[in-house]
């Protein structure tokens, strides 16, 4: 399944020490160059070596991205670029940014976040439940802003406690 991924998902998975598992899922992971430009850890070279496909924006898309970012300054250029490419390519958008998810919902663009990725890792049996709980806790400890109730449901499922 093709998807466009945003920086915050890559950062959260890296912070949870499970980024390589993303590439064991049945996803074709792409991201626009502005997203790669936002990242320090993991860096662009590491991500490309892992299998992220770099997407180049057309001049028209670039103009739209810059305009979108000017209209919504709380979104980064990378956020806007990911949205435009996912929309234009008609593929799933994986992002944790609430504003970006709301924009995607307005046009019925399939969107998921890092908790969905964890669920997919669980379904593929790439980690056992205690390992998933540990990874999620690491993400939260590093500042991931995830829905409290949804995290508690997963902790309950994976550890027997919320």
Image (cartoon, grey):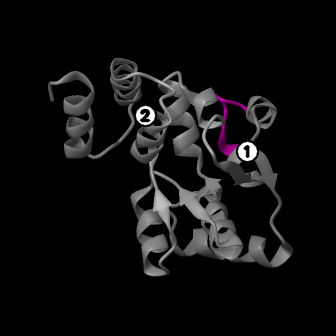
In the image, taking residue 24 as reference, residue 16 lies left or right, namely left
Tell me what residue is drawn at x 76 percent, y 29 percent: 46
Q: Quadrant of residue 79?
A: bottom right
**Cα–Cα gap, marks 2 and 1:** 30 Å
In the picture shown, does residue 17 fall above or below 29? above
Report whether residue 74 is seen: no
Label 2 or label 1, whichever lies nearer to me, is 2
Position of the N terminus, as image quadrant, is: bottom right
Q: Residue furthest left?
A: 161
Figure disc tally: 2
Rendered position, 100 above or below 108: above
Q: Residue at x 69, y 75 (%)?
A: 88
Mark 1: few, some, or many residues within 10 Å (few <14, many ≥20)?
A: few
Asked whether 40 falls inside the magenta stretch, the response is yes
Secondary structure of the residue carrying tag 1 is helix
Residue 145 lies in what quarter of the image? top left
Magenta: predominant secondary structure element? Answer: loop
Q: Is residue 57 magenta?
A: no
Report which residue position mark 1 lands on: 37
Q: Residue at x 48, y 35 (%)?
A: 121
Q: Which mark is residue 143?
A: none
Mark 2: few/some/many CA within 10 Å (<14, 14-19, 20+): some
Q: Is residue 50 above or below residue 89?
A: above
Q: Which numbered disc flags the more N-terminal residue, 2 or 1? A: 1
Residue extent of the magenta highlight: 37-43
Q: Secondary structure at mark 2?
A: helix
Q: Position of residue 3 (x, y in %)?
A: 64, 57
Image quarter of residue 146: top left
Instruction: Give residue 122's mark.
Output: 2
Quadrant showing the C terminus: top left
């Amino acid at each position: 399944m093709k998807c466009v991924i945003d920086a915050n998902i890559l950062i959260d998975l890296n912070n949870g020490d499970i980024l390589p598992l993303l590439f064991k899922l049945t996803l074709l992971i792409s991201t626009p160059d502005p997203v790669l430009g936002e990242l320090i850890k993991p860096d662009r070279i590491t991500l490309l070596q892992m299998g992220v496909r770099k997407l180049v924006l057309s001049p028209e898309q670039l103009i739209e991205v810059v305009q979108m970012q000017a209209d919504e300054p709380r979104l980064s250029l990378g956020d806007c670029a990911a949205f435009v490419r996912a929309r234009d390519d008609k593929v799933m958008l994986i992002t944790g940014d609430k504003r970006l998810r709301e924009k995607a919902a307005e046009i019925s663009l399939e969107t998921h976040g890092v908790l969905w990725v964890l669920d997919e890792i669980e379904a593929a049996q790439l980690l056992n439940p205690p390992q998933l709980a540990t990874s999620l806790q690491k993400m939260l400890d590093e500042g991931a802003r995830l829905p409290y109730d949804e995290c508690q449901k997963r902790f309950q499922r994976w550890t027997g406690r919320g």
